[in-house]
Image: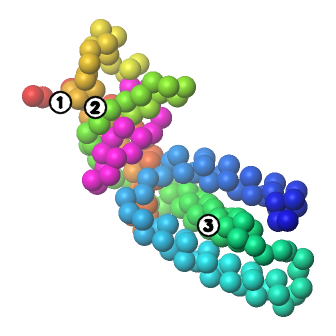
């Protein structure tokens, strides 16, 4: 079975970890990026099937292994694309947006929910520590504030979040 190969499993776990770390710094406002990645992954899956048959690799192809192979290609190509954009981020101009805060949460990691180009995102951000303590205890206090996000725009409506700052109170 494919996952019994420790080398393959180690690479898969490592690439998944890198994908997760990169994904925390990017926001996607459309599904175009993921559709392109899925299309490329399916093409590579068929190439893999052809090579498996032609070169007589000993990879058993069943539905589970097929899903793992396509998933692996998706994660790999997403990670390569985001890594390339991450490495080239200094060549792209910063754009700043003032976005409304939709909510916040205080779990293991504090975070904030915000709206950007019609979609809602959440990112780690300690909102409660940035406002006066007496105000942070009021219900709905976050509605008085906005976030300033500094982003770098890449292809397929992919944005790298350079910084998130809390703006002063919104005037009523």
The quadrant in which the N terminus is found is: bottom right
Q: Is residue 66 left or right of residue 20?
A: right
Secondary element at image label 2: strand
Density class for disc 1 (Cα within 10 Å; few <14, some 14-19, many ≥20) is: few
Extreme-top residue of the structure: 134
Q: Is residue 61 above or below residue 24?
A: below
Provide the residue span drawn in magenta. 113-127
Distance of label 1 from label 2 (alpha carbons): 8 Å
Q: Secondary structure at mark 1?
A: loop
Q: Where 49 sits versus 144, above or below?
A: below
* Residue 20 belongs to the span the image colors magenta: no
Q: Position of residue 172 (x, y in %)?
A: 9, 28
Label 2: how many Cα within 10 Å (few below 14, some 14–19, many 20+):
some
Name the quadrant containing residue 125: top left
Disc 1, disc 3: CB below 8 Å?
no
Q: Is residue 118 left or right of residue 163?
A: left
Separation of residues labelled 3 and 2 (CA atoms)? 37 Å
Q: Which residue is identified by label 2?
A: 167
Q: Badge 1 is on which residue?
A: 170
Tell me what residue is drawn at x 27 percent, y 53 percent: 118
Does residue 171 appear in this view? yes
Q: Closer to the camera, 113 or 1?
A: 1
Where residue 124 appears, as percent x and y from the top left, is 47, 35
Q: Are marks 1 and 2 in contact (CB under 8 Å)?
A: yes
Residue that numbered label 3 is attached to: 74
């Amino acid at each position: 079975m494919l996952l019994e190969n420790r080398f393959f499993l180690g690479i898969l776990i490592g690439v998944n970890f890198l994908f997760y770390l990169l994904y925390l710094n990017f926001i996607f406002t459309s599904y175009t990026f993921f559709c392109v990645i899925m299309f490329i992954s399916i093409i590579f899956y068929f190439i893999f099937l052809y090579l498996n048959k032609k070169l007589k690799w000993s990879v058993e192809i069943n539905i589970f292994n097929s899903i793992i192979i396509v998933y692996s290609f998706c994660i790999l190509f997403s990670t390569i694309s985001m890594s390339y954009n991450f490495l080239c981020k200094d060549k792209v101009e910063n754009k700043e947006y003032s976005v409304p805060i939709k909510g916040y949460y205080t779990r293991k990691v504090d975070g904030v929910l915000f709206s950007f180009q019609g979609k809602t995102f959440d990112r780690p951000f300690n909102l409660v520590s940035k406002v006066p303590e007496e105000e942070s205890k009021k219900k709905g206090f976050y509605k008085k504030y906005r976030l300033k996000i500094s982003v770098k725009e890449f292809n397929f409506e992919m944005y790298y979040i350079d910084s998130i700052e809390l703006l002063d109170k919104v005037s009523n």
